Image: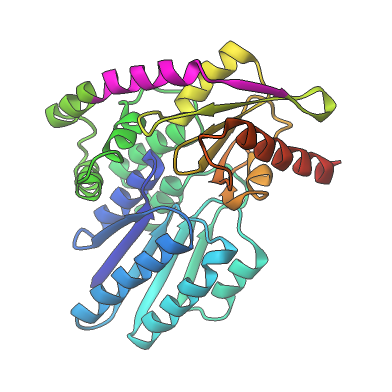
Amino acid sequence: MNSIIVSHESDVDGVFSASIALMRYPQSKVIFTSYGRDNFLRISDLIYKEVVATQGNGLVIFTDLGLNDESISPISDTFSFLKSNSWSVLWIDHHPWSETALNLFEKDKTFELVLDRGGNKCASELMYEHLLYGNNKAKQLASIAHTSDYLLKDQDIPPLPELIVYYRTLSNFYSKITRLAQRVSDGILWDTEMQSDFNNYVNLRNEAKSKSLKMIRIQGLSGGLRMAIIPVSSYIQTSLFSEEIFQKTAVDVAFFFNKEGKVSIRRNNPIIECNKIANELFEGGGHEYAAGGKMKSDADQIDKVLRELQDATETWLKKKI
């Protein structure tokens, strides 16, 4: 059967859920992407070209990608095109969805949505349960993805989160990340090539972290809460770096932003709802414990960045009260 796998490009869960899908459909074309309308338009174009180039029906599997409201229109058009060509859709995810996005799947049973609303499972676990339940290799991959996605310390895993961050800085990122997914689907979690790549990355990461630590800004919030903003380079894995930031500052929430205006939000206090704060930003979304979006401010104007992110947080706080 013709099949296409579309997954999140930024983390272990995105790679591993694609790998588990590859174990079930090894002939699949694999496409990685990130959030935002422009990215979904790019994916729609790639799917269109792939479907036109093949004959017969097929299946598109989306995994570890939430459907934000601004991306519903291009995805709806893609769904109509797929249906007209006798292709079906399986979408597996664990992010919060709006009712508008959910309605897209209620219109036609050709499109199947597997969504964890409890916040306890990552996409790889859902993929394992839905496509390869009982397969020990897929079960182990799902367990590793869970550990990585929920920032747990329940098992030691290879430094794949940082390796993926490094690959995203390379011009051949998509070929690198696709090859990684294929190797993981074969049960290869680390090899000499990965080790060589990681060695190249470590010095770049350490230098970037040193610069970021010198530029932390801390701001008080309503209710005695405190936030920090930290400029970061593309060599920093924000979830891991957030642990250092929280140890050094004891703030309740941290915002990491890069030159392109992308913001990653991490919490050090269960009161904080990162996804709700992210909703106050452009293309925001994610989980309570980790989320992201885009800011309007120029990353070089740190006072304006601080004000924008503080305003977003205070707006969420007012709604929470």
Hey, which residue is sitting farthest top in the picture? 248
Task: Provide residue 106's location: percent of width, then percent of height.
Answer: 58, 76
Above or below, comparing residue 232 to residue 80 in the picture: above
User: Is 130 placed left or right of 250 in the picture?
Assistant: left
Question: Who is closer to the viewer here, 137 or 309?
Answer: 309
User: Is 2 placed left or right of 83 in the picture?
Assistant: left
The image quarter containing residue 15 is top left
Question: Who is closer to the viewer here, 233 or 90?
Answer: 233
The image quarter containing residue 83 is bottom left
Above or below, comparing residue 288 to residue 227 in the picture: below
The magenta-colored residue range is 201-219
Hey, which residue is sitting farthest right in the picture? 321
SS majority, magenta: helix
Question: Who is closer to the viewer here, 111 or 274?
Answer: 274
Task: Provide residue 22's location: percent of width, then percent of height.
Answer: 26, 55
Task: Provide residue 276's location: percent of width, then percent of height.
Answer: 68, 46
